[in-house]
Amino acid sequence: MMKHLTYLTILYFFSILGACSSSNSNNTEEPTPAPPQEVLLNLDKCIVSTSDEKLEIVTWNIENFPKGTSTAKEVAKVIKAMDVDVLALQEVTSKSTFEQFIALLPGYEGVIMARTGLDLAFIYKTSEISINGNPYGIYPEDEYHSPFPRRPFVLPIHSKSTGLDVIIVNNHLKAKSGAKNEARRRKASKLLKQWIDSEHPDDNVVILGDLNDEITELPAKNVFQVFLNDSVNYAFADATIAESSETSQWSYPSWPSHIDHIIITNELFDNKADTYTYPFMSCDKNYDQIISDHQPVCIVLK
């Protein structure tokens, strides 16, 4: 009988000990997970050297800017590294966002035409560029919304290094395929050419932006045929890129297609030194996630 009681006592003691141990383990706090690390882009090998003696103008759809919490800081870092004179941007989400972003870029100023929430803007380097009058929009939305869901945005500039006065027309034409959307882009092309022929027949004009179509289409379907038919007065500075089989050099490689273009008037034919794309998607797989699904396109004028 005594042995039996002793055995029960020992069992009871170890059951109490186990319960306490279990209770203590349940109350142990889980380790706090480490905060997610901020993804930093490495685009250095895709940066092209610039010249203080030339004028560099870039078009860049920066896709719903800013896409994330680190986007503004990363874009500012890229712009400083690019060191170009003028950037024409598409898809800036708000004026306040843009103004906060410009504060990250000492030595640059910016202007935005705040309209739709996917707005057009310019950034320029103040040491190299002065503005010839106020920027302005053409073709008001109420009358021309079909061809221009966003009004073309005009920035008249003077390049201190080259002495060139240039009218830059920033555009973001209607997106997506289909006959109706193509008709809208075709009409926009005709109106842009009509405006330049009428208002700036002898001026240096650069028309650029996300034009949302390819220049390599056959003439019957080509929405830019009005420019292509007038090769005496107009040229696509990025034609070599568009006609290349190197899809990594196209402005919209995820499709893949080249739909961001730069058109120049004949007054600038002899000034064109180079045109190239920054193939950022090839340099860093996170570029699309953090900044944009479009790659910048640059023209260099001498």
Image (cartoon, rainbow, N blue to C red):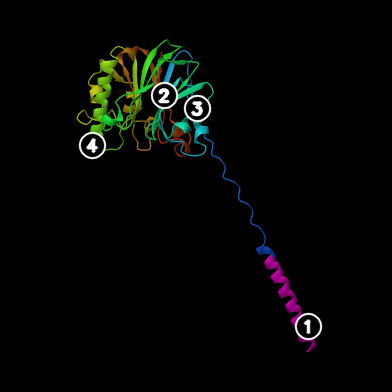
Q: Earlier in the sequence, mark 3 or mark 2?
A: 2
Mark 3 burial class by Cα count in 10 Å: few <14, some 14-19, many 20+ = some
The residue at 31%/33% (across/down) is 149
The image quadrant of residue 209 is: top left
Which residue is identified by label 4? Answer: 180
> Between tags 1 and 4, which lies in front?
4
Query: Where residue 6 is drawn, which disc sits there?
Result: 1
Q: CA distance from mark 1 to mark 4?
A: 93 Å
> Between tags 1 and 2, which lies in front?
2
Q: CA distance from mark 4 to mark 3?
A: 37 Å
Q: Where residue 68 sits: x, y (%)?
A: 49, 39
Magenta residues (range): 1-23
The residue at 26%/29% (across/down) is 143
Magenta span main SS: helix
Q: Is residue 69 above or below residue 57?
A: below
Q: Are marks 1 and 3 in contact (CB under 8 Å)?
A: no
Residue 293 placement, left or right of 220: right
The image quadrant of residue 7 is: bottom right
Query: Where residue 58 is drawn, which disc sits there?
Result: 2
Query: Please, what secondary structure does the residue beneath circle 1 have?
Result: helix
Residue in front for this viewpoint, 179 or 120:
120
Check the image and name the residue furthest to the left.
Answer: 220
Q: CA distance from mark 1 to mark 3?
A: 82 Å
Q: Where residue 153 sits: x, y (%)?
A: 36, 25
Query: Please, what secondary structure does the residue beneath circle 4 have?
Result: helix
Q: CA distance from mark 3 to mark 2?
A: 17 Å
